[in-house]
Image (cartoon, rainbow, N blue to C red):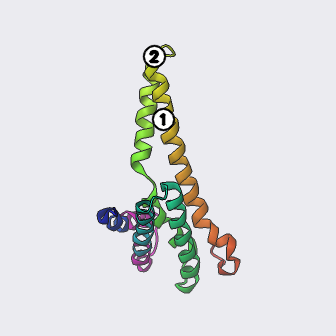
Amino acid sequence: MISLWAVLWAAPAATGFAMMFNVRKRALPIVAAIAVLARFITEFAQAQGVTIVVADYFAAVVVGALAYTLGPRTHEASPVYAFAPVIPLIPGAILARALQSLLKWINSGGANDPQAGQDFLEFASSGFTAAAIVLVLCLGALTPMLLLPRSRTAED
C-alpha cells in the first residue's frame, strides 16, 4: 500500500536539502514536485512487489531525465534538479538498523557468543542494502546524462 504521507513529505525534505545546496528560490517548487514524483514511483513500485533497490533506481532515472531536460530550459544547472529530489529516497530506517546491529555486534561477548554472528549478519545485510540504495540513486540520477549527451549544458 502506498503511504501518502511518505510521498508528500518528500517535498519539504528535498526543498530543505536544496536550500542547503543554495538552490535559487524559483527552482525550489520544481525540486519539490520532482521529489514527490520520485517518492511516488518508489512507493508504487514497492507496492507492486519490486525491491527497494530497483524501485529507487527507477525513480532516480526518472529524476535524472527530468533534471537533464528541465535544467537547460529553466536556465539552471541540471544537477540542481537531479540530486536534491533523490535525497528523500535514502532509507534512514535501514541505515539506523545497520548502525544498531553494528553497535550490538561490537559490544557482543566475542567469538563464543552465538548472538554475535547473528548481529554481524544483520549488520552486513542492512549495511549492504543501504550502500546499494545510495549507489543506485547516484547511478540512476546520472544515467540520463550518459544516455542523452545533447542535454548537457556548460554548467554540468
Q: Pointer 2: what residue?
A: 113
- Assess disc 1: are there few (<14), some (14-19) or many (≥20) residues with their C-alpha within 10 Å of its C-alpha: many
How far across and down, in percent of the image, does residue 69 sit? 57, 81
Residue in view at x 44 percent, y 44 percent? 95
Q: Pointer 1: what residue?
A: 123
Magenta stretch, residue numbers: 13-32
**Mark positioned earlier in the residue sequence (1 or 2):** 2
Does residue 77 appear in the picture of this structure?
no
- Indicate the amino acid at tag 1: Phe
Does residue 11 appear in the picture of this structure?
yes
Front position in the image: 27 or 41: 41
Residue in view at x 40 percent, y 61 percent? 47
Magenta stretch holds residue 24: yes
Check the image and report above or below for 91 versus 86.
above
How far across and down, in percent of the image, does residue 23 sit? 46, 71
Residue farthest to the front, as pictured: 49
